Image: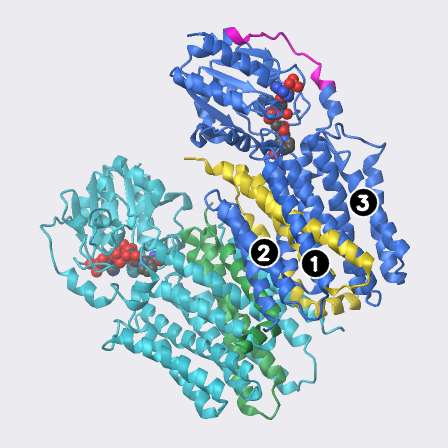
Chain colours: A blue, B cyan, C yellow, D green
Amino acid sequence: MNLDIIHIIYLFASVTFILGLKMLSNPKTARNGNILAAVGMIAAIFGTIFFHEGEVSNVIYGLIFGGIGLGTVVGWLTAKRVQMTKMPELVSLFNGMGGACAALIGLVEFHHNLDNPTNIAIILAGMIIGSVSFSGSIIAWAKLNGTLKNAIRLPKYNILNTLILIGLFVYSAYIVWSGTYSEAHLYGLFTAAILYGILFVIPIGGADMPVVISLLNSFTGLAAAFGGFLYGNQVMLTGGILVGSAGTLLTLVMCEAMNRPLFNVIFGAFGDGDTAQAAGGVSQGTIKEVGPSDLAVQMNYSNKILIVPGYGLAVAQAQHVIKELEQLLEDRGVEVAYAIHPVAGRMPGHMNVLLAESNVDYDKLKEMEDVNPEFSQTDLVLVVGANDVVNPAAKTDSTSPIYGMPILEVENAKHVVVNKRSMNAGYAGIQNELFFRDKTNMLFGDAKKVLTELVNELKALD
Amino acid sequence: MNLDIIHIIYLFASVTFILGLKMLSNPKTARNGNILAAVGMIAAIFGTIFFHEGEVSNVIYGLIFGGIGLGTVVGWLTAKRVQMTKMPELVSLFNGMGGACAALIGLVEFHHNLDNPTNIAIILAGMIIGSVSFSGSIIAWAKLNGTLKNAIRLPKYNILNTLILIGLFVYSAYIVWSGTYSEAHLYGLFTAAILYGILFVIPIGGADMPVVISLLNSFTGLAAAFGGFLYGNQVMLTGGILVGSAGTLLTLVMCEAMNRPLFNVIFGAFGDGDTAQAAGGVSQGTIKEVGPSDLAVQMNYSNKILIVPGYGLAVAQAQHVIKELEQLLEDRGVEVAYAIHPVAGRMPGHMNVLLAESNVDYDKLKEMEDVNPEFSQTDLVLVVGANDVVNPAAKTDSTSPIYGMPILEVENAKHVVVNKRSMNAGYAGIQNELFFRDKTNMLFGDAKKVLTELVNELKALD
Amino acid sequence: MNEIIEFFTQHKDMIFIVVLMVFVGVEVIGKVPAVLHTPLMSGANAIHGVVVVGAIIVMLNSEPTNYIAMGLGFIAVFLGTLNVVGGFVVTDRMLEMFKKKK
Amino acid sequence: MNEIIEFFTQHKDMIFIVVLMVFVGVEVIGKVPAVLHTPLMSGANAIHGVVVVGAIIVMLNSEPTNYIAMGLGFIAVFLGTLNVVGGFVVTDRMLEMFKKKK
Ligand SMILES: NC(=O)c1ccc[n+]([C@@H]2O[C@H](COP(=O)([O-])OP(=O)(O)OC[C@H]3O[C@@H](n4cnc5c(N)ncnc54)[C@H](OP(=O)(O)O)[C@@H]3O)[C@@H](O)[C@H]2O)c1
Ligand SMILES: NC(=O)c1ccc[n+]([C@@H]2O[C@H](COP(=O)([O-])OP(=O)(O)OC[C@H]3O[C@@H](n4cnc5c(N)ncnc54)[C@H](OP(=O)(O)O)[C@@H]3O)[C@@H](O)[C@H]2O)c1
């Protein structure tokens, strides 16, 4: 068999990656795109094994297939078992694994290229980026997961981080040019890179994590590409660069959707727990409360209700109750739909994924542009655990950090009911004037608990 | 100086080509995109000369700079002097020059690669494609130009052409595999390719030429890419493939805009002079005529007039008169605008280019989708030299060759006046029922002549 | 300076591929609806799992006596596969959710 | 068959570049408004004038005594330059027309 056939397989795999990613950005073809890329990946992996030139011992084959088998089982099970709402953290975790893989490759290959400064440079670059991506992703995972609650900020952390970054550069440049390719230096660099990944992510607020994950994602891509450069391996090169460039663009697109420059995300402007807490206490007027029983009656007599879900719905895991509520209201002849803000929740599409889990009809999810004109014909808007995405300050107050972000214009509806646990602020850490408006009533309590009560009250109405 | 720097220049040039083409597809950046690509091209050309390795005699430098100088002067002057409406033919001519250049390279390089069958294959491929593109473009130019009036069709020309094409393949495959690299074979192949280019384009109707030119354009790109492959020259390779793939897509997009599959364009379904002539004579009812003086009065009392320009306006070179007409009507308080069909005329954007030449305000050019709802509030539509783009058969008659093409719905206006020279058919060679409608009046005569009369009548009204 | 140019010349094809791939990456994304940001990120995440190919190459080339290299290589293959398989499966699950539109 | 694979292997970088470039070409065009079809075609026409680089290489490599090669090369350089210069200038003129929108 002609072993050169591997290059054709690699070309095939690269093309599936490109086409797959392209198809992933269109709702109709997304799922097939993912499968296509997976097919290419399988071809690339097994092609690499079977069309390898040279003798390979059985032990090594055993280890390779062992690693692949183990990875497949663990990866498959974790991915299948995880809750819908825990998916972002899982993506982060998998990303970290990819980064670690790149770093390990670097650690091993270093010894085989001691005579080639260019290769050493490439290896170190891939190793550093992989390590940063690895440790950064783990921190991001811990933050989203709740294991690591607050943003931990060393004093002058921005300066510190920048210094470490420069240090990493200088250190590796020194190693390459001086030709001192010792074990000690290698592991020193490795440790420094791991440390930098931790310090880079740890001061960033938990809510910014999706953006950070997307950024680290493109880092891992870059690390893979360095590996490709090292081996002259086309599929690693193209796959890595593809993710590197597409991932960077995606990061910027996500920032844009949140009206928040990437610079602020990394160097911190808001989004850390402290500010949120601080601003949360300030009240700007009087608020009116409403209880579940009164609300149930009011809803019963409405013609059209729009539900605005937000981050709190995901936190409370109230997606099933809300579906039940919707069903009950529809049975009573009330028209119900969901108004989805593009950045509601903590990841793009968060609300869609969440509500899809409880089988909410796709047609009932209305996008911001389509639903905004509808509020004026709406009797009641129920805001569940959303805050920033309905904050009128985005339109009126030019000093507000969210100024300019398009919002759901709930204030045009006849009545607004807001469910949250307290008067605490949301992601942006700012107070929301909407809560103090005349037509707004607050329904305090955990979303799942309160909505369950509401459902029971509605059932009791018959 | 390090001669390897040429590779960096080539990379730079390739990037300018990509970015330039990207910018060209957006109205705002188009002009800068063109300039950017031109800058890259200059860098690539002079980089090739100055960073060449090895001794080169002064005679050769002289010839190179002579060729470049002469080409620049001739190219510049022709391009600057040509009339706006003659531009498509000029593009075709320039395209042919590129094809000839590729063919000549093949003719010379053949002798230098007699020991390398792969290279011979590449050379022959580039040479054949270049030659076809050359002779095809010249025919296309002659057709658009009017030098070559009718579609000349040998009996069974489709079969004949296909046979020649197969022959070309077989012949060159034979040359490559047999290793008989003689002068005679080379020039035999060259002649056959030239012949094929002629026979390929000559049966195609003149109005299909824009599509054919776009196709030949991507052929030349391909020929350039083969050259790049031969020399391992990155900039020729990327530039050529870029044009090859973008050009092919563009060809398809253009076909789509005309609702005409590429297959029909090449193998002929309509669009040749004969059918047009034949169908032209058939009348389907009675028509009403109107004269310039009556029309002038009618226009004077209209509130809103829409002008639908078509191919005839370009033929008659009536763009300046129509601008004068517009001005006169506006001075009299009539609201005037132009309804532009995407495929009016004989090349995309034909009407825009034409009307821009007479300084018609850009805001007055309304695209089909935007203007169609406006016809019902329009007092009078003046159709000038357009036919197919206002043919209701596209909507009503499923047997019509233009069925399914979106049209300008002029029949919704209060009055329709159509200016053309006779009852002859347009590009699609079919009769137009609109001309026989009750609300339609025909204004016969050459557009320029008749509109001048109309303008004079309007002036006389005061 | 000359070293950089030399490096460039030696790897000019690779560098071309990198530059073109950057364009492809940027163009391919284009206008993606916000709803698809997460699956897209997740799909891209799976694709960079191609780094596992590198880990496999490390293993294939390692001496059967170099236990450290083999150990690290094994872990790398395992982690890389985790990235690939987990990435594609999670993406598929996300997209499955969206599918329920009828 | 084996010959094809061998050819592929020898030129694998070039072939990758070709494939990627095809994607770039297709993606770069994307949705272009009908009005710009002609200038775009014309701009692309100018770009494939890069074939003149090949003509220049022919000349640079030709023996100063090979008059046929030099003659053909000279014509090729001339025609290629015509393609380039004419192409860019005509495109610019077309686009200049559109500019008059204010
Ligand atoms: N979607 C993304 O891609 C993304 C990524 C990063 C950042 N962001 C940002 O996240 C924000 C999203 O806006 P949002 O309106 O969805 O969320 P938000 O502004 O963060 O507000 C969420 C609200 O939910 C309430 N809440 C928390 N747990 C709850 C529970 N168990 N039951 C009921 N309510 C609960 C909280 O108030 P209490 O504490 O008083 O209950 C909080 O005010 C935007 O600022 C956006 O820029 C979005
Ligand atoms: N735009 C493109 O990219 C493109 C490219 C290729 C083909 N096409 C096709 O071309 C057609 C364009 O439609 P169209 O309505 O603009 O043109 P058309 O259907 O070809 O009709 C043009 C009409 O103008 C009249 N005419 C010719 N010379 C004239 C003159 N000197 N004064 C007045 N009238 C004159 C002709 O009738 P008389 O002979 O009776 O005067 C003819 O019926 C479509 O079928 C389209 O698919 C377009």
**Residue B32 percent coordinates (x, y):** 55, 55
Mark closer to the chain start, 3 or 2: 2
Residue at which label 1 appears: A62
Q: Label 1 amino acid?
A: Gly
**Residue A122 percent coordinates (x, y):** 76, 59
Mark closer to the chain start, 3 or 1: 1
Q: Within the magenta stretch, is there residue A283?
A: yes
> Which corner quadrant of the image does residue B331 belong to?
top left
Q: Determine whether label 2 and label 1 are within 8 Å by CB.
A: no
**Which of the four quarters of the rendered structure image does ligand 1 lie in?**
top right
Which secondary structure lies at badge 2?
Answer: helix
Residue at image x 52%, y 66%?
A: B241
Residue at image x 25%, y 66%?
A: B272
Residue C19 visible in rendering: no
Residue B66 visible in rendering: yes
Q: Is residue A117 above or below residue B154?
A: above
